[in-house]
Image (cartoon, rainbow, N blue to C red):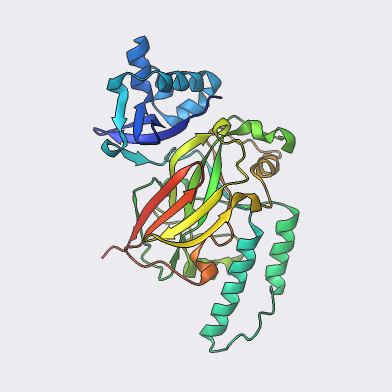
Amino acid sequence: MKPLRLVTFEHEGRRRAGAFINDDTRVVDLAAAHEQRHGIYAPELADILALIEGGDDALDKAAEAVKSVPEAALLPRSAVKLRAPIQPPPQMRDCSCFELHLRQCYAAAREMRAKAKGVELLADTGPSEAEQRILDLFSKQPIYYKANRFSVIGTGETVIWPAYSRMMDFELEYGVYIKKAAKDVPVEKARDYIFGYTIYNDFSARDAQAAEMIGQLGPAKGKDFDTGNAMGPCIVTADEMPNPYDLTMIARVNGEEWGRGNSGTMHWKFEDLIAFISRSETLYPGEFLGSGTIGNGCGLEAQRFLKPGDEVELEVEGIGVLRNRIVKEA
């Protein structure tokens, strides 16, 4: 693979595949660059999912297009509208990889329940029996759920506050796109199946989530609402990211830092996830696996929640900034 920072963008009413250059200030129209150079239209360069499905040959064409760009195929970033890298992806799974996030969410929820009852917690008694069972399972195997791929949006797009919720939150995550069909992949070979990395904000209706998790079937309306899965701004191809497990991750709301962490605190790495999920099941090119929320990566952990009009910025070292405003419709 060649190192690339791939994007999906809209320009003059058409959605195209592109790549950032010049410190992400300009965008290469990949298909246009290839056609102007060779006189041949390459459909695999017009769409990011088609590019991934096209394998290394398609990626080589994309790298060549970026290396020598005709001026007519080059656009300022300010002139295009970025979408999620793949919108929608073929499949989405969000995993739980950060133990600190789980423990701090449980502690915050215990304190909030006590406050709601008018009780002051002098000392935290630690995880409940049910919480400890989840923590024990977490230590033994990856935990994940399948997210709503049709609610994916990109950076700069508006998140619509779901009408049934009064308690909205963000989640600071990153994730990988699958490079090629993967089934029964041993963990030591799993990195070969990673195409690239992006930032992921799993917006969450915490009040709905708290109610439905009692049913023990995983999140539903706490996560499933239009515009709830923000991803972007780009896919950083795997060889551009020599160590994905030493990245600073920062969450800001209206410019104020609310939390930060380092990806090195992942208990389960992406290779572990691919090996586990691919057991007797095929993962296909373009599928997305989220890391789950990093410790200190959501409002719940600090008992702070979003307000209508808030702008959330998630920054992951080496990838960029994912920025979205949450709006409550009248």
In this picture, residue 147 sits left or right of residue 39: right
> Can residue 122 be seen?
yes
> Can residue 182 be seen?
no
- Taking depth in this image into account, of 169 and 73 the one nearest to the observer is 73
- Is 168 above or below relative to 239? below
Name, please, the residue furthest toward the left. 12
- Taking depth in this image into account, of 90 and 23 the one nearest to the observer is 23
Q: How many marks?
A: 0
- Is 322 above or below relative to 131? above
Residue at horizontal 48 percent and vertical 42 percent from the top: 319
In this picture, residue 194 sits left or right of residue 21: right
- Examine the image and state in which quarter residue 240 appears: top right
Residue 294 x/y as whole percent: 58, 56
In this picture, residue 242 sits left or right of residue 72: right
Residue 298 x/y as whole percent: 51, 62
Name, please, the residue furthest toward the top. 39
Residue 149 x/y as whole percent: 47, 46
Residue 256 x/y as whole percent: 41, 62
Residue at horizontal 63 percent and vertical 35 percent from the top: 282
- Is 61 above or below relative to 25? above
Instruction: Name the quarter where the N terminus is drawn.
Output: top right
Instruction: Name the quarter where the C terminus is drawn.
Output: bottom left
